[in-house]
Amino acid sequence: MNMEEYPLDGIRIVDFTWAWAGPYANLLLALLGAEVIKVESLKRLDHTRLRSLMTGPTMGSPDQSTVFNDINLNKLSLTLNLTKPRAIEVAKELVKKADVVIQNMRPGVMDRLGLGYEALREIKPDIIMLSSSALGSTGPEGNYSGYAPTFAAMGGMAYISGYPDKEPSTLSGAIDTRVGTTSAFAILAALIYRQRTGKGQNIDLSSSEAISCLMGEAFLDYSMNQRVKERDGNDDDVMAPHGCYPCQGENCWVTIAVSTEDEWQAFCKALGSPDWTEDSRFADAPSRQQNRDELHRLLSGWTIKHTDYEVTEVLQGAGVAAIPTLRGDMVSKDPHIKERGLFEEIEHPELGKRLVVGPPWRLSTTPAKAPRPAPLIGEHNQYVLGELLGMAQSEIDRLIEEQVVY
Amino acid sequence: MEQALSGIKVLEYCSFVSGPYCSKLLADLGAEVIKVEEPGTGDAARHRGPFPNDSPDPEQSSLFLYLNTSKLGITLNLRSPAAKKVFKELVKNTDALIEDTSPSTMKDLGLGYDVLKEVNPSLVMTSITPYGQTGPYRGYRAHHLNIYHSSGQARFSYSMSQDSALPPVKGGGFLGDYDAGLSGAVATLAALFKHILGGPGQHIDVSRQEALISLDRIDIGSFTNDISMVERRRGMLGGLMRCKDGYVVVLAPQQHQWEAMMNMMGNPEWSKGEKCKDEFARSEHASELQPLINEWMLQRTKKEIYHLGQSFGCPAAPVNSTADVFKSPQMKERGFFADIVHSRAGRLSYPSASYKLSETPWQANRAAPLLGEHNQEIYCGRLGLSDQELAEMKASGVI
């Protein structure tokens, strides 16, 4: 078998997205072998080339953003200044040679630019176009804008995340990448349909709805019982112990979850059967659930005497679910993650050597691609304009001079 | 109706959230999914709830009902030799098998990928497990709580008043389990795309832990390469704030959005000074400026702030409960909730999908199956077993 074979060989995507959600969708598709051409411009810079919600404005220059790099691996960059009519024409030429267009500008912007679905379908009848926005492009709030934390808030996930007597949690930037994963899924489904029927289509995605889909049972509970799901921290409706416990060392934690009576017995034995495990308050699952706060306190007294990895080893040895709560900086050092080779080292021309998270799946015969650094801004102008669109060098030079390519 | 994945056949041998969600995504877009459950007990989600009026009934668990729409359901006890033969017949006629047993289980049953690819060389087999098929933790036991915390995600939050004495906390509900199902569905469709083009069959290893790590690749990448990032986290003004009747999120990462936020607040005097002149200055004086913003929010309801903020061009949102989402005019207009009638649970409103495909819309083709509901249809109708053979399989506990 040819070692260069990837699932999405031959698929070309024109990427008008920015921030995190859209770029993550394209990252997944690029890792699966699609050629992703990111259309950007100094006039309208992807703000992750300069700042992030988490770190604020810390990037030295557009080519030195670690945030941009980590979510735009394996892509190509074309700089087109879409405020110029000629740039729209060039973009359309590119769409003619593409399979998929993805964009996450505010609803209506692409239409005004002359790059809406109807316009693109005229020039490429089987194009698949996905537009991702805060709340979808239709409806009374269709033109509202948002970022990951507002998607978590609008969709219902923030309300149910966090401790019951504390504030809700809007979670992390992973809310955006969840939206991106959903987009990648929808595009793949449309690609399969096109392959079978020759038909393209338009996909309108609501980021906030994408998050709501990840808590379906809570909505059904409301439909069924008119009950509003509240925050429950690390607790579980059924299991106890079920929580995150302090361990030896600064800010070190381990999670433990005991699900059956057999596991509870094995768990007690693994702890050396301290007296409190014999307590009638913990005699059966309902009692343990009822007295879970006390159980949490007593168990914390045991975990704190050990490291997170020690607790894990002892409990897993007894068949009980336990694992350290990994900090961001601990993930790449974990022995299991190391052995799986999830992180890969890349060499970025401006950032130097850098460890990045590789593809999240292993496909046995058509593997995902190894990570390559994100493109410098405009790095592939020559390839796209010259090679792909067949422009003469004199024309490319003129486009640069007229700041169409900018 | 022709759907995006019409004609694709999927066999599911999964339980609880991740695997069932993976194949639900395919089923609701038209793939034919046959779900194989253990006779008697069935999918663990059947026993989890929430149930109507909290009275347990394996046919009325909302977790099961949601995660298994559009599927056909059969029972099969894979430990019996007769069942293995039947299972291989099913594998022969499928494009994809999605399974979520622990890494050695299928092999021990004599139904590992190496065996099944002999039966069906173009089979796409997706295995979704807590920590993947390889590595020292491959046999580790895990629940949603554990996997979420092992991914780094429990340590990241934009919450401003993070109480560091409290243990890190997981995402709500079974968030991380859904994530793994969604990630598995992406890989499965990619492999199926290749398969339609005549590509080879293959085995896909999906680690639930890795699915979550990949989602937080930016934060994790930052801390992995430069630990000082932990110290350099800057406060951006706004974010999650308490308001009159709950919480709101108001964001202004870009200058024009900051100006919009200030316009919304009536351009107070303090916003015109040196301390607000740019994002660096604001970040520097966050501890002094943030309370002034908080105070303004406290006087207003989440609905007021939401619409007012958005009217000025500032990304604002209410922190919605499930009830709020249900009542949202926006989601109503888009038809996000779909009514589905189940023979036992009756008519309920289900979240549909976030994507509107113009040619091939999302559609729940049927409610979740009763345990073994389609035994007759699949075993007799498809595999050609006689009624008597079916009765014997039932009597001997095979189905």
Image: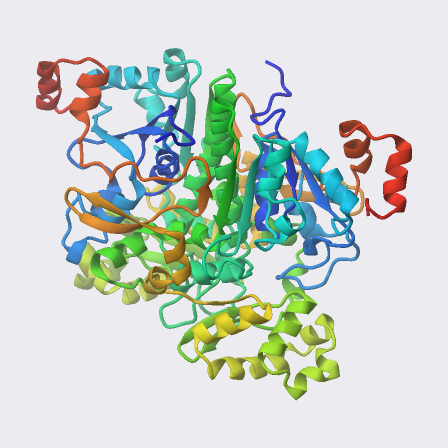
Residue A275 showing in the rendered view: no
Q: Residue at x 39, y 30 (%)?
A: B103
Name the spot of residue A364 as percent of width and height, x first: 51, 23
In the image, is residue A25 above or below residue B291?
Answer: above
Q: Is residue A251 left or right of residue B344?
A: right
- The residue lying toward the viewer, choosing from A185 and B329, is B329
Q: Residue at x 40, y 20 (%)?
A: B113
In the image, is residue B231 above or below residue B121?
Answer: below
Name the spot of residue A406 as percent of width and height, x first: 82, 48
| Quarter of the view holding residue A332 | top right
Name the spot of residue A367 as percent of width and height, x first: 57, 26
Number of marks drawn: 0
- The residue lying toward the viewer, choosing from A115 and A222, is A115
Name the spot of residue B192 as percent of width and height, x first: 47, 25
- The residue lying toward the viewer, choosing from A195 and B291, is A195
Q: Is residue B398 left or right of residue A132?
A: left
In the image, is residue B269 above or below residue B61?
Answer: below
> Which quadrant holds the N terminus of chain A?
top right
Q: Is residue A398 left or right of residue A81?
A: right
Q: How is this picture coloured?
A: rainbow
Q: Is residue B378 left or right of residue A175?
A: left
Residue A357 showing in the rendered view: yes
